[in-house]
Structure formats: C-alpha cells, structure tokens
Amino acid sequence: MRTILISIIVVSSSAALSLAAGCGGGNSCEDVIANMAKVFGFGGSSYGDMRAKAIAGCKEQKFSDKVRTCMASAKDKGAFMACERLTEQGDQGGAEEYLKKSKKSEAELNLHSIQKALKAHFAENAEYPRGSAPLTPAAPCCEGPNHKCAADMALWSGNPVWDALDFQIDEAGYFQYSYESTDGLTARATAVGDLDCDSTTITFELMCESAQGSPTCTLAKPSRSD
C-alpha cells in the first residue's frame, strides 16, 4: 500500500464557498493540488471526489504566495518537504494548520486501508486475524530522520498480523501502527503520532466488531488536537 505524506484534506462545505480566499498572485490553489496529484500519484475516483474540497481547503488556509509557488513547482517529494520547511520558518500564510491536518490524514488513510483488509479477511475466514502487532515502528517517529518514521519494509514483514492484512508502510511518515485481536470476533488497530514533537501524542483508534456475523468498523479520532 502507499502512504501519502502530504494528503488531500476534506474541509467543511462552507470553506468550499471561499472561492477567492488565499488566491493572491502567483500560483493558485488549483495549481498546488494539481501538482500534488502529479508528484504523489493521486488518481482514480477518490481523487476526483476530493479535489474540489482539497482546493477549498487550500484557499481557506490562505497559503502565502511563496508557499503556493513552492508547492506548485515542486518536482518531487523532497521538494515538497522543503516547502513544508518554509512554514516552519514563519512564512506560512496559514499553511501550518493545513499541513498538520495533512499529517493527520495519513493516519486516517492507513487505518482505512487496514479496515478494508480486515473486512476482506473476515469475508474469507469468518474472523479477523488473531494475534497482535506492537507499535510499528517501535521508536516514536519524532526520533527518526526529519522527525518521521523511516520507511523500513523489514519492520512489517514476518509479523503474522501485518502479513495477513498485507499491510506495510513504504514511505516515511508521522505515525506508528498497532493491532490486536484475541478472539477473531473483535479487532483494534491504532495510529499513534506526535505531530509537533512536544512529547504529547494523539491516537486514532479503529474498532471492529462482527455482530451477527457481519464485520463493522468505527474510527475514533483524537478528542484533542496535537
């Protein structure tokens, strides 16, 4: 599966009405999202459904001209990381909160992938994978290069749970993931991250049940912001 480090953000419908907010001179938010799609390989119907909301989110956050120009002209993922550093240096134009939301969406996207894998496994085996996988990677992401968990395929292979779900992270990210199911009838997966590396973590929790033989899952988002 593919981890998206800078992700499309779903924003409120009111934000979609802010057609002029944050446009200014230089590159537009449409240019930013189009280039994100190209560099990160967004595609398919899911991208089409979210594109308008992603553009509205960019406009709502009122990116500065410099940040929008940087993101619209980035040629690879490393260049996007450089654009992110612009916000850390104070030239953020409202982009800092937008990028934090982007980091959080990594957890939602990956837990959604785990949910799909769990339902497929249940359909074939009448139960979720039994067993547990501790937080992977084991070390907090803030301890890694650029305050991210480095991509290491070896961390995901060999664990029966991750193998059964065919789940792995092949790009550096901001979250650690865990899984547990003792009876095969219920399952719990988590994504744990510290987005600003202040030693205060947030946790996304995916809870799955199988009442009457039908797999259902619920995603609980953090009750507080990081």
Image (tube, rainbow, N blue to C red):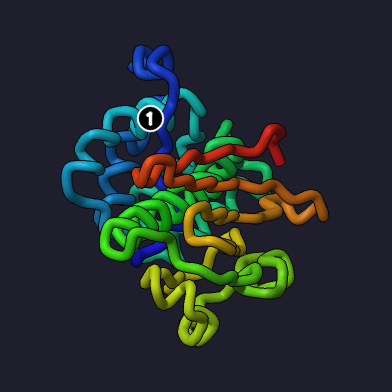
As drawn, the residue found furthest toward the front would be 212
Q: Amino acid at mark 1?
A: Gly
Residue at 42% in and 48% down: 7
Q: Is residue 170 shown above or below 223?
A: below
Q: Secondary structure at mark 1?
A: loop
Position in image of residue 195 (x %, y %): 67, 51
Q: Residue at x 71, y 67 (%)?
A: 140
Q: Position of residue 83 (x, y in %)?
A: 50, 53
Mark count:
1
Does residue 177 show up?
no
Residue 194 place in picture, x, y as percent: 70, 53
Q: Nearer the viewer, residue 156 or 61?
A: 156
Is 50 in front, or is 224?
224
Q: Which residue is mark 1?
A: 25
**Picture residue at 59% right of the left edge, 43% below the top:** 100
* Nearest to the observer: residue 34 or residue 115: 115
How many C-alpha atoms fall within 10 Å of the one at disc 1: few (<14), some, or many (≥20)? Answer: few
The quadrant of the image that shows the C terminus is top right
Residue 40 occupies quadrant = bottom left
Q: Position of residue 192 (x, y in %)?
A: 65, 55
Which residue appears at 82% of the width and 55% of the height? 199
Query: Closer to the camera, 101 or 213?
Result: 213
Q: Residue furthest left?
A: 44
Asked where in the image residue 29 lies, by quadrant, the reply is top left
